[in-house]
Image (cartoon, helix red, strand yellow):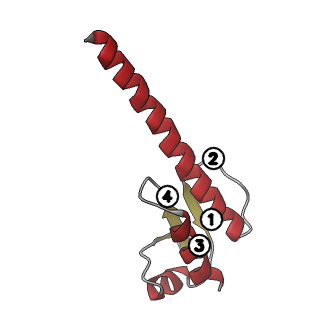
């Protein structure tokens, strides 16, 4: 039983790393679309005028902090989500 639990714990840690890597990959796709520097976080902050209005018009909920857009990516985020947000902000 201990071997089974140990193997399960190892797999869960591996999945956690894979999810975090995907989150950062999506965030960096978003950064690239805004000509921002590559980062090592799934959270992106950027000074984009009217970002909240542009995203809301596209049906996207986002947060602003001190006038800057703040978005984060996680397991439920997709490349299509990134592209939709970028199109709303830049298109």
Secondary structure beneath dot 1 equals: helix
Q: Is residue 47 above or below residue 71?
A: below
Is tag 4's residue or tag 2's residue first in the polypeptide sequence? 2
Instruction: Quickly name the residue at label 2.
Output: 40
Secondary structure beneath disc 3?
A: helix
Q: Looking at the image, which is closer to me, 9 or 85? A: 9
Query: Are discs 4 and 1 less than 8 Å apart at CB?
Result: yes
Q: Which residue is label 1 attached to?
A: 30
Bin the neighbour count of mark 2 within 10 Å (Cα to Cα): few under 14, some 14-19, many 20 and up.
Answer: few
Residue 73 — which label? 4
Location of residue 70 with respect to 23 vertically, above or below: below
Q: How far, Cα to Cα, is label 3 from label 1?
A: 8 Å
Q: Earlier in the sequence, mark 1 or mark 2?
A: 1
Residue 83, image quadrant: bottom right
Measured from the top left, where is residue 51 in percent x and y?
55, 80
**CA distance for labels 4 and 2:** 12 Å
Would you say the residues marked 3 and 1 are in contact, meaning their CB atoms lie under 8 Å apart? no
> Which element is circle 4 on?
loop
The tag earlier along the polypeptide, 4 or 1, is 1
Location of residue 91 (image quadrant): bottom right
69 displayed left or right of 34:
left
Q: Residues within 10 Å of mark 3 (few under 14, many from 20)?
A: some
Please report the residue visible at 71 percent of the width from the left and 54 percent of the height from the top: 38
Q: Are marks 4 and 2 in contact (CB under 8 Å)?
A: no
- The residue positioned farthest toward the top in the image shown: 2
Of the two numbered discs 2 and 3 in the rendering, the one whose residue sits closer to the viewer? 3
- Could you give the CA–CA distance between mark 3 and mark 4, rounded to whole angstroms? 13 Å
| Location of residue 31 (image quadrant) | bottom right
Local crowd at mark 4 within 10 Å, few (<14), some, or many (≥20)? Answer: many
Q: Residue at x 58, y 60 (%)?
A: 44
Name above or below for residue 41 compared with residue 3: below
Which of the labelled discs sits on residue 83, or is there none? 3
């Amino acid at each position: 039983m201990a071997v089974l639990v140990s193997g399960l714990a190892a797999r869960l840690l591996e999945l956690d790393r894979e999810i975090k890597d995907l989150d950062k990959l999506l965030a960096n796709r978003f950064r690239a679309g805004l000509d921002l520097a590559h980062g090592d976080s799934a959270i992106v902050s950027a000074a984009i005028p009217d970002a909240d209005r542009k995203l809301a018009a596209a049906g996207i909920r986002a947060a602003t902090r001190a006038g800057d857009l703040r978005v984060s990516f996680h397991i439920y985020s997709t490349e299509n989500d990134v592209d939709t947000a970028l199109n709303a902000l830049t298109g």
